[in-house]
Amino acid sequence: MSLKSYSRARAVHVMLVYTGGCNGCDIEIVNSILSPKYDAEQYKIFLTWNPREADVLVVTGPVTKFNEEPLKKIYNAIPEPKAVIAAGACALMGGVYKNIHGDIPSEEIMGPVDKIIPVDARVPGCAVRPEDVLSGAVAALPKLLEAK
Amino acid sequence: MDGKKKSSGQNVIETEITMGPVHPAALEPYRVRLFVEDEIVKDAEITVGVNHRGIERIMEGLPVEKANSLTEKICGICSNVHIWNSVMVAEKGLEIEIPERASYIRVIMGELERLHSHLLYLAHGNEVLGHETFAMRIFYIRETVMELLRMIGGNRVQYGVSIIGGVRPRCELDEMRIQKIKEGMDFIEEKVAEFADRFVSDPMVMSRITGVCPIPKKEALRLAVSGPTLRATGVDMDLRRDMECYDPFDFDVITLEGGDVKANLLMRVLEIPESVKIIRQAIKNLPGGPITDRTWEMQDTGVIKSYVEAARGRLYHSYRLEDDRVRGSIVRTPSMSNIGAMQYACIGHHITDAQLGIVQCDPCFTCTDRAIQIIKL
C-alpha cells in the first residue's frame, strides 16, 4: 500500500445529503457513524458537513425537484477521488414515492440518484440498517484508495 | 427579555443571514432567513417545501390497506403514530371494535416510539448546544429502545404494527418479548435518571439554556403550538387523556413554566418516566385473547377525522372511503403547527441562539411538507 492510500484510509470523511426521503435512513446513518453502539469512527470514518472536506457522499431520499440542483452542486464541490453511496430504497429506485400507480410517474421525484450523479455503492433497505451502512462504506473504499 | 411585544414582519432588515436548504446544523433540508441587526435577530422566516413528495396525492385512489402502510412513509421518526392514526380513521368509519390486547400492544408501540423520539430530541438538542458527551450518552440509551422496536416490529424504523382491526400477527408479545421489554424499561429508567441528575447539576449547560428563546403561554396559544412544546409553556393539554386506548392507564401530564430551551429539554426528560410507567402498566395487565379482528366489512363512508397525540404534538388524518378506495386524504402533522413558534422563538435573541430556538420546538420538516393552505388571521 502506498503512502497516499495508507493515509487516505485513516481519515475517510463521509458527507450525508438528504434529498427528501422520510428521515428514517438519515437518522440511521448519523446514528451508525456517531452513536456508541455502531461507532464507525473506530474504523476512521468521520461525519462531516463540508463538501470540500468530504471523500464519500452518502445520498438518501428519492431526490425531489428542489433538491436536484443542490445535489449536483455538492457532488461537484467534492474533490477527487470521491465515491458516492446511495442508501435506502428511495435512493436506489425512488421508493414508494415514485411510480406507485404503475404508469403515472410522480412529477415531484427526479430520482433515483444514479440518474443524476454516478453511484459507486448501493445500500438497500427501508430504512437502511446501520450494519449495512458500514459495509456500504467499506465497499466504496477501494475507489478512494486505488486512485492516483 | 424586556416586556415589549415582539413582532415579526417589520421593516428592520440590516443583514440577512440565510441557512439551508442543506446546512450542517440542521439535518433536514429547510431554509431559514434571519434578519439580523447588531447580532440580534429581528425577524426570522422558515421556508419548507423542499421535501414535498405529495403523499396525499399518491394515496388518492389506493386500496385502504395500501394507503395505510404508505402513511408510515410520511415520517421516519414518528412512523408508527402515522399508521396508527390512519388505521384509526378507517376503524372509526367502518365501526370496528379492535380486541383489547391489540389496543394494549398499540399503546406499547406508541409509547416506545415516544421514548425514542424524545431521546433523539435530547441527543440532537445537546449536539446543537455543543455538548457532545451528553449526546453520546443519550444515543447509547436510545439504542435500547431501537432494539425493542426492532424486536416487536421487525425493523428499526418503520414497523407497520397496526392493521385495520388490530395489529399484525408477527407483533404478538410472547413471554420472551415481555421479559425483554421489562429489562429495557428498567435500564432506560435508571440511565435517564442518571442523565437527568448530571444534566441539571451541570452549571455550564444550565447557564447556557436558561431563559434562552422563551415562548410565553399567551403567544404559544396564539400560534397554535401543540405537544410537549405547548406543555413546556404551562398549558395543560394532552390528547392522550381523551384517547380511548389510553383509558386503562394511569399517568401524569407534565407541565412546566417558561417555554425556554431549559423547559423544553426538561419537559422531554420528565416525560420519559411517564412513558415507562404506561408501558409497565400495559405489560402487567396485558389481556389475553386474539390480536386481530377480521370480521369487518368494507363499505362507503363520509369524511372521517381522527386526532392522536404524537411524540411532537397533535396529528390529524382524514379521508373518506369510496369503493374500497381512499379519497380526499388530508394529513396535518405536529411540526406544521410549531413552525410559528420556531420563528417566534428566534426573534429578539442573539444569532448564536437562533438554531437552539428552532431545535427546541422539535422540528421534523419531512412531516411538515404537506400541501396546505395558510389562512392569515
Image (spheres, coloured by chain):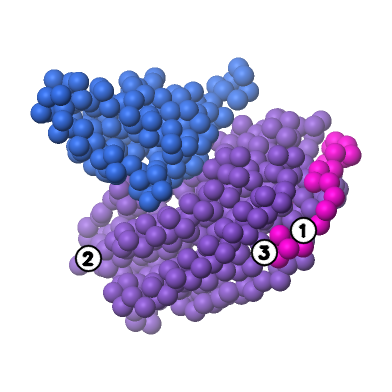
Chain colours: A blue, B purple
Numbered tag placed on residue A9 in the rendering: none
Q: Nearer the viewer, residue B112 or A89?
A: B112
Magenta highlight: main SS? loop
Q: What segment carries the magenta color?
A: B280-306
The reply to whether label 1 and label 3 mark residues of one chain is yes
Q: Quadrant of residue B241?
A: bottom right
Crowding around mark 3 (Cα neighbors within 10 Å: few <14, some 14 to 19, many 20+) is: some
Q: Is residue B103 visible?
A: yes
Mark linked to residue B39:
2
What residue is disc 1 on? B286
Residue B278, image x and y in percent? 66, 65
Q: Relative to residue A79, is residue B159 drawn left or right?
A: right
Type of the residue with mark 2: Glu
Q: Which chain's residue wears label 1?
A: B
Q: Real-space Cα distance between discs 3 and 2?
A: 48 Å
Please say whether residue B228 is visible from this viewpoint: no
Residue drawn at (39%, 72%), measured in percent from left and top? B199
Q: Which mark is residue B280?
A: 3
Query: Which of the two marks, 3 or 2, is nearer to us in this view?
Result: 3
Residue A16: say if magenta.
Answer: no
The percent position of residue A87, horizontal first and vertical second, equals: 42, 31
**Amino acid marked by disc 1:** Leu
> What percent of the width, then of the height, locates residue B107?
69, 56
Q: In the image, is residue A89 above or below residue B170?
A: above
Q: CA distance from mark 1 to mark 3?
A: 10 Å
